[in-house]
Amino acid sequence: MKNGENYNLNSRRTFLKSVSAGILLASIPSFLQSCQEKVITFAIKLSGTNHILGHRLRTKDFPKISRTIEIPYLIVGGGIAGLSAGRQFKKRGIEDFLILELEKNTGGNSRNGENKHSKYPLGAHYLPLPNIHDKEVIQFLQESKIITGFKDNFPIFDEEQLTFMPQERLFIKNTWQESLVPKFGISKAAEDDFGRFFEMMTDFRAKKGNDGKFIFDIPISSSSTDKSFNFLDKITMKEWLLEHNFSSEELFEYVNYCCRDDFGLGIEFVSSWAGIHYFASRKHNSTKDKTENVLTWPEGNARLTTHLKAFSKDKTLTNHLVYEAKTVGDKVSVKVFDDAKKESFEIISDKVIFATPQFINGYLLPERKDISKHFHYAPWLLATLTVDNLNDNDSFPLCWDNVIYGAKGLGYIFNQHQNLGQIQEKKVITYYYSFSSEDLKKSRKELLSKPEKFWKEMIINDLKIAHPDIENLIQEIDIQRIGHGMISPVPGFISGNSRKEASQSIENKIFFAHSDLTGISIFEEAFHQGINTVNQLLDETTVA
Amino acid sequence: MAKNFLKFEYLLLFAVFVIATCGLIYELVAGTLASYLLGDSVKQFSFIIGVYLFSMGIGSYFAKFVKKNQLNTFVEIEILVGVIGGLSSVILFILFDKVDYFQFILYLLVFITGCLVGLEIPLLMNILKEKVEFSDLVSNVFTFDYIGALLASVLFPLVLVPQLGVMKTSLFFGMINVSVAIALCFLLSKELRRPALLKFKAILAFSILLFVFFFSDKILSYSEQKLYGENIIFTKATPYQRIVLTHTKNDYKLYLNNNLQFSSADEYRYHEALVHPVMANAKSIENVLVLGGGDGLAVREILKYKEVKKITLVDLDEGMTTLFATNTILKKFNENSLNNPKVKVFNRDAFLWTKEEKNKFDVIIIDFPDPSNYSLGKLYSLNFYKSLQNITKSETVIVIQTTSPYFAPKSFWCINNTVKEVFPNADAYHVYVPSFGEWGFSIASNDLKNDFSQIKRKATNLRYYDYQYKKLNFFPKDMIANDLEINRLDNQILVRYFDEEWGKL
């Protein structure tokens, strides 16, 4: 009821009193706890992509082929690109297709985990509001009831699937402030840097090439073919910032954060074309008031996987690893290992779509061995923590996205943020860490070889900056390791030829669809890849 | 003699060490309390360190005027530092709600402690200068001084605050301070003048500190009492909130998390205005829903209508509803309404419950806490009102408490506009409740033809409402706000309006 009455009068002293009383009261249990400290343990689960099965591609010691089946259309890989391809087949009236997936669930980077308190993402966890001209994504969101209707030609997004307020906070100088761009306690020079930077990004956002298309658009395939901005792909984002006389630490840290978040790589390694694409490709034009909000769910983009999956129900085999593919006459022969039954079999298809990343295709298709070497991937580590509480200084309340300035990781997502209820008994958060380095292979080795204790300590030390007693509040940790998390748009990659070459079909029978072919690892790119490849495959067949 | 002297020197150096430790602790205590109360910890700590160091300088300056009885003065200062420093946190705690001169007292205490600590070192060097070589003296004194400072600054955040809390930390170090003085009195009694008097002073000081130390919890609750300015007769902490009942003369007040929930002297005005306009107007009142309102006071009003067959009350806090169904004093307020056989209580989250509920209700009465944070803000969102449609019939009438249209007109009308987005027929009205001020409500229905001022039935024995709805729904100019956004989950604009409006008072 009416607590506004004493709102201001009491807030300050209430706060004070509750803090002081809290400190006194807390002294007893914390003392007891400190006695127990040595025996505090919590469950840690270390999991990740099935790299053990995946690594068998190197040796290919699979059982002999026991049988052969035929299916006209085969999709290898059940990530977003593969599932989107399945959806597109269905939309074009084709039912006789099959999706093969190595993991036990489809979704790729858009899968999720679940514990008794919440679902949580095992990778991608949000979708920014799509550009209004991205008809395919808008159509998909509408059929998934994420867009509930249209008003004045603008889509109406479901209130429950838009990120609730408060969305983002940044821990800097020992306080939380709203939004990831620091607002308080920064110098005038830093403020000016931010202002100028965002102005430049706004200009880039509106820039169009000589064909009238946007220079920076999503998907990349619908952006302008005008090459006059390709020079941006020659240098790193950091070089670009320096070239434009940006100097404030806060701006560098912010842009670095954004690049690590979207590409896995920081400003030192990512091309400035990609870095600018992050800011300029989203036009914020799908709402009347130019909202920059994102769509999110407790399970992250696994929600989108669920919607896509509906189109390939009963047409998906999981725990199935494709280990070889070649054209035989006018057909394609694909060898598959069923990890559940431990048997191998052959699939004969008219057309096959490889919705797998290129580093995998290098093992499956001899003709792709060389080209796959030009694709580099940043490893990722995610840790979902179940905690009693987060006990921070409450200078700004818990948000969906919580970033700690200067931390090693990318902060954490509060997975129950979209919960409509008032209180969560336990809080479930997912901590994100991307390996931004020159030697991604070395990072990958480190990721897979270091023991769970090592990662646990790193995560806790990182979170401790903002949550000093988090270690005592943890109930369990689920660490997810992703060796090849994202394609790395290093300088030269997006404007170079490898992407184009790797996108070429083989003899009009083997086709490719994956976000790594675009250079940008986001849902929309993978989604369009699936659609475009199916269209290409069917339309070229019709022509033939 | 040499051996004895060694003891003398080290004893005094140990005293330096203790003073330095204690001095810094008092400073840290002051800094911590100041940043709790005044915010901006960087500023507070910076000012306090500055004032402390400066006053040490003043103390050092005045040390040269102490020519006689230096050792006596040294011990006396030691006692004084212990008492003032030790009690400083207690004094500050009690002055919590006197924000106006809190700062003055705070800096005064820091200043005095600083002066006294600043006096000690030059004084000590004077005492020892004839007995020890100067270079040894200076380096020894400062070594112990700085080690003490390090010890204090490490112990304070890591051990003392978490284990003892701020108040007990300062008292504890006050006692250490004084016990050094006591030790000096006894060990150096030959060197001191009138040692007996000093001993007495030191022991008295120690006993005072010890006494306060043991009663510090009581003092805490005393300062809490002072905060309310009333006698606390009952407190209970549930997992969701702290419930405090106070009593002055003939008035009982209930606070939830220190926010006034009701005053027994005038709550009838609020609850009659909340309940009777809808109950009088709705086509049917057989099946009534109350969301929030775990105190049972709204239910008491609803039960005044005999036609009511069933009342469903959904309140998150089981501790609250149980308390109001069992506590003798509280049961008197709600006339034992929560134990009425017509009433069914669900301790569920209202939003989640509403989403899942299959039944529809004739009247819905919503009495949630004000939208003072983002969690509560959800309960005033467009999405929540849409969810209400699940349990609403075409002729259902809904009332919602919507904060004060006088203190928070933007918040008030923002809620009303949001309700209007979902329910085509909506209106607002307000009443004066002395302990709250002007307070308001939104009333809504799907039935466009329903006129809220139409009275279909009346209850007897009301003290305030006379079924003249038209007297309540007029809003003068100072209770109007325009150009407001709709409150949605993804903008929670209401929480910002609310914060802005109540925050500026």
Image (cartoon, coloured by chain):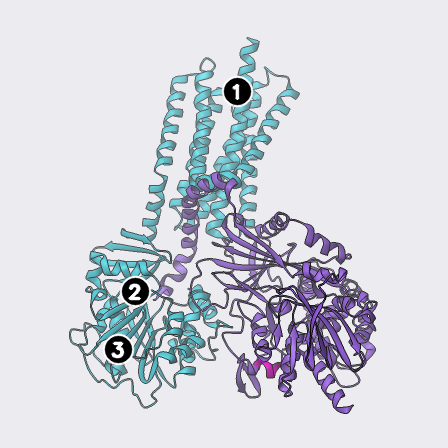
Chain colours: A purple, B cyan
The chain ID associated with circle 1 is: B
Q: Is residue A139 magenta?
A: yes
In front: mark 3 or mark 1?
3
Magenta stretch: give its range.
A137-141
Image disc number at residue B287: 3
Q: How many other residues sit within 10 Å of disc 1, few (<14), some (14-19) or many (≥20)? A: some
Question: Residue B6, relative to residue A401: is it above or below?
Answer: above
Residue at the top extreme of this rendering: B1
- Would residue B186 appear left or right of A193 to someone viewing this image? left
Q: Are marks 2 and 3 in contact (CB under 8 Å)?
A: no
- Would residue B376 appear left or right of A233 to someone viewing this image? left
Image disc number at residue B11: 1
Q: Are marks 2 and 1 in contact (CB under 8 Å)?
A: no
Residue A336 figure quarter: bottom right
Residue at the front extreme of this rendering: A66
Circle 2 — which element? loop
Quadrant for the N terminus of chain B in the image: top right
The chain ID associated with circle 2 is: B
Mark-to-mark CA distance, 3 and 1: 82 Å
| Residue B286 x %, y % | 23, 79
Q: How many marks?
A: 3
